[in-house]
Amino acid sequence: MAAWSNWSGSVRARPAEIARPRTEAELARIVAGAAKLRVVGAGHSFMPLCETTGTLISLSELEGEIAFNADKSRVWAPAGWSLAKLTAALWAEGVSLINQGDVNPQALAGAIATGTHGTGAALGSLSTTARAFRLMLADGSIVTCSDTENADLYQAARLSLGLLGVATRIEIDVIPAYHLEEKIESHHIDAVAERWDEMVANNRHAEFFVFPYGDQAIVKTLNPAPSEGPMEQMNDMDDRAFRVICDLCSALPFLTPSLQKLIVRPGIRQRRVGPAYQIFPSDRTVRFEEMEYEMPRANGWPALREAIAWIKTRKLPVAFPFEFRTIAADDIWLSPMSAGPCLSISVHQYAKMPWRDFFAGVEPVLRAHGGRPHWAKRHTLTAADVDALYPNAGRFKTVRAAHDPSAKFANAHLASLFVEGA
Ligand SMILES: Cc1cc2nc3c(=O)[nH]c(=O)nc-3n(C[C@H](O)[C@H](O)[C@H](O)COP(=O)(O)OP(=O)(O)OC[C@H]3O[C@@H](n4cnc5c(N)ncnc54)[C@H](O)[C@@H]3O)c2cc1C
């Protein structure tokens, strides 16, 4: 038995074996021979998506290279490559991903399997950029799917939580390489609320972070810009001071509200320009637990205000800020963005502080505003909730059952949501 844990430390598993195949032939032998298995990317999910007592497969050592189509608008990439490795390789070839989230250690397949996204009203999740998959099915055979080949399998694979098979290569959209200007500014939360729609409309990417007890928000905007030479500062924010504050909140929780008023001062102004693949991600070294809900754009502000009020009324020590982002609508069966353009609210807590009761209290607030959870982040949906919230859940389950009738790729958590009769 091997020991495995996710990034935040909240999911611990004892898989029978952790396998790191180097070739598809080796992978096929492992997949065909296993009774139960899960694939892991970088283990950055907060839900027990990779938990298994069977075989845990990592594709980090699987051989493979990137291969472009004729006009370099699409690339086939090894599914196990981290976004960090992939985006650096793409940059060297003069192309970039259309959008990225906050960090880049995730495997390409892990990010796509969960609908990982960044911010941008006109920009969809990474799953929306997946054009085709090379998938290994439960018997070790390989199938390719796209909107013209095995179309139902493709629709399900665009956000699959690893329930259909092992993606070994994924074809994604790319665009010519670009630089981004990042601006980080502190503003009173009421001023941000007043100007939010304008900020969203006027910037390719706009988002903000706000602490429950602070009245200043940290607003971050990104827009394409000409290069200004090598970047001096690789990270958006220095989190050394933040770590000290989180440890203080953990040791002396009653100090949390006053410390938060000190963290974000009025008048913060920061600017840098760099390659998109280096500006999007930052090192997040202070570990946290996270819940995130996507909801109709108009419901974002009332939901945020209610969630903050819920925390303040109970005087709960919540050390981390909320994150507020936009995501374009998509048509993916299990995507929380499939109902229309979304506002995304992320709720975080320092990993060393209690989060379960706090998340359990805020989750109904976000759900009452039409929220559907990010599948990789903490949520308590049941099978009935999935059916009620996702009109296409039945289609996903039919495709899953057809390709993996023995539910080899399901673990207890996922079987409870997607395997009929589990
Ligand atoms: C610090 C931090 C920052 C984050 N920032 C963001 C953000 O900005 N935006 C956002 O949307 N999310 C964010 N997330 C969530 C993260 O993007 C998702 O949890 C993502 O799934 C993690 O990728 P991973 O490679 O670690 O996948 P894992 O957690 O390892 O796996 C996720 C799922 O993918 C499946 N999978 C992995 N590889 C394969 C494969 N080859 N074939 C089939 N299935 C596979 C797994 O079985 C599992 O179901 C963040 C998480 C952390 C910890």
Image (cartoon, grey):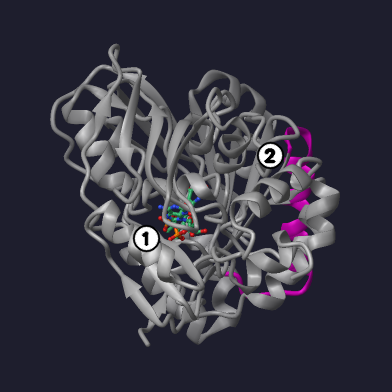
Q: Is residue 285 visible?
A: no
Position in image of residue 22 (x %, y %): 22, 58
Position in image of residue 5 (x %, y %): 42, 76
Residue sitting nearer the eye, 164 or 48: 164
Residue 409 magenta: no
**2 or 1: tag closer to the N-terminus:** 1
For disc 1, the marked residue is 42
Position in image of residue 185 (x %, y %): 45, 38
Q: CA distance from mark 2 to mark 1?
A: 24 Å
Residue 298 magenta: yes
> Looking at the image, which residue is at 27% across and 60% down?
26
Instruction: Report the residue that reaches farthest toward the top.
Output: 71
Left or right of 110? Residue 298 is right
Dividing the picture into quarters, in which one does residue 91 lie?
A: top left
> Looking at the image, which residue is at 62% across and 65% down?
406
- Please tell me how crowded label 1 is: few (under 14), some (14-19), or many (20+) other residues with Cα within 10 Å: many
Q: Which mark is residue 333?
A: 2
> Disc 1 beta carbon < 8 A from ligand 1?
yes
Residue sitting nearer the eye, 60 or 303: 60
Which circle, 2 or 1, is nearer the viewer? 2
Q: Disc 1 marks which amino acid?
A: Ala
> Looking at the image, which residue is at 57% across and 56% down?
163
- Please tell me how crowded label 2 is: few (under 14), some (14-19), or many (20+) other residues with Cα within 10 Å: many
Magenta stretch, residue numbers: 296-318
Left or right of 13? Residue 159 is right
Magenta stretch: helix, strand or loop mostly: helix
What element does badge 2 sit on?
A: loop
Q: Is residue 148 visible?
A: yes
Q: Is residue 129 above or below residue 406?
A: above
Position in image of residue 349 (x %, y %): 56, 68
Left or right of 314? Residue 196 is left
